[in-house]
Amino acid sequence: MDNKQKGCQNCGGVVKFSPKTSSLSCDYCGHKNLIEQIRHPKGVEVFELESYQTEAFDEQQIDAVTIRCNVCSAETTLGEKLTSKSCPFCGNPLVLKQSRVKRLHKPHYVLPFAITDDEALISFQKWIQGLWFAPSLLKKRKLKKDKFRGVYLPCWAYDCDTVSDYKGERGDNKTHWTTDSDGNRTSETYTSWTKKQGTVKHDFKNILAFGTQSIPQEDLNFTGWGLLDLQPYNPDFLLGFETEVYEWTLRQGYGGAKVYMVEAIEGYIKRDIGGDHQTISWVSTEYGTVYFKLMLLPVWISAYRFKGKIYQIIINGKTGEVNGDRPFSWIKIASVILAVALPLYCFFGPESQEFQAFFADLVKTIPSYYDRFLNYVSETLPSKF
């Protein structure tokens, strides 16, 4: 990944990629330097995994100057003529003399930034205002746009056709009604099981496996990336931004993609079985030829401190969607839960399905605090009135 500086065609000043455009902007004279874009005649091309590793390994590599953070271990590329730099993921000052030349797979495609730092700030503010159970003080906080760092993340994308044979059982809920001597009717629900077997096929496309370990993978599960706007790799799109070096290799990325496929295939089998309940006793999956591409995807990264704790924010550099850490207001959570749960507790009782279903559904929206909150409620609410 080449982050070498480039001179303006008009004045020779340093230029950087301008989001939402196809040009490099010069901060000195304002001139727009157009980026030459090359479209592959076949559109977005993919590469066969096995043949790529055996035939094209050497010719598809590039040399890049990289530096690793001593605090969070993130490794990013290093531009020319830098006298100082801080880690875009944790903000720690980097020791430039620890940089090294590293041989890397050359990316096939890059998804250019389409969101500016001003728009990233607006997206963050809207996200904060829309958070449920967020502390009131947090919603009053103001974050400056210079706190956002634009980073291209390495991402492997895999395609694979699968054919899965399976055996299992389908469970259908049925109701049996009985009438006593007084004419009162009662019902009993039971599950009727039947054996099922079959075959499901699925064509997996663009299974994403990010090569970063600096950001939790769940924070990168955005609704979409707009991959139709992928551009053939051109280092001009990287100018003015930082690029992380992949930690997951091509093989490791495929391992993560295969885990995703296994879980997805289980869901497809259950859908094929049908009914109210499904069990799977045996699955045999044949994986077809695996194809892949290496992409650089854009994110804006920032962090804010609230009551002594640092929370990381990730903003999709293409769509503006926001993911990340956030604090909760226990006062607001407790107020809402008690306001609704207490009447249910009093009216139906603690063993009722209504009370237990409401309580589980609401509190499980915050899984990491579920057990702690259960203990709190069990100690606070009496077992009987």
Image (spheres, rainbow, N blue to C red):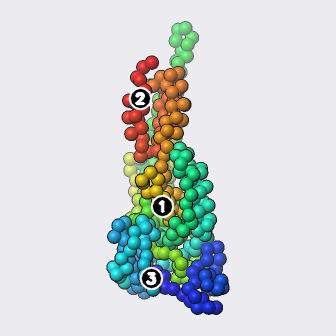
Residue displayed at 59% across by 57% down? 125
Residue displayed at 53% across by 44% down? 133
Q: CA distance from mark 3 to mark 1?
A: 24 Å
Using a 10 Å C-alpha cutoff, classify the residue at mark 1 as few (fewer than 14 neighbours), some (14 to 19) or many (20 or more): many
Point out the tag, 2 or 3, that comes first from the N-terminus: 3
Q: Specify the amino acid type for callout 3.
A: Leu
Q: Specify the amino acid type for callout 2.
A: Thr
Point out the tag, 3 or 1, that comes first from the N-terminus: 3
Q: Quadrant of residue 99?
A: bottom left
Q: CA distance from mark 2 to mark 3?
A: 58 Å
What element does badge 2 sit on? Answer: helix
* Picture disc at residue 303: 1
Point out the tag, 2 or 1, that comes first from the N-terminus: 1
Q: Specify the amino acid type for callout 1.
A: Ala
Residue 124: image x %, image y %?
57, 59
Where is mark 3, residue-wise?
82
- Relative side of 298 to 87, left or right: right
What element does badge 1 sit on? Answer: strand
Does the rendering let one see residue 203? no
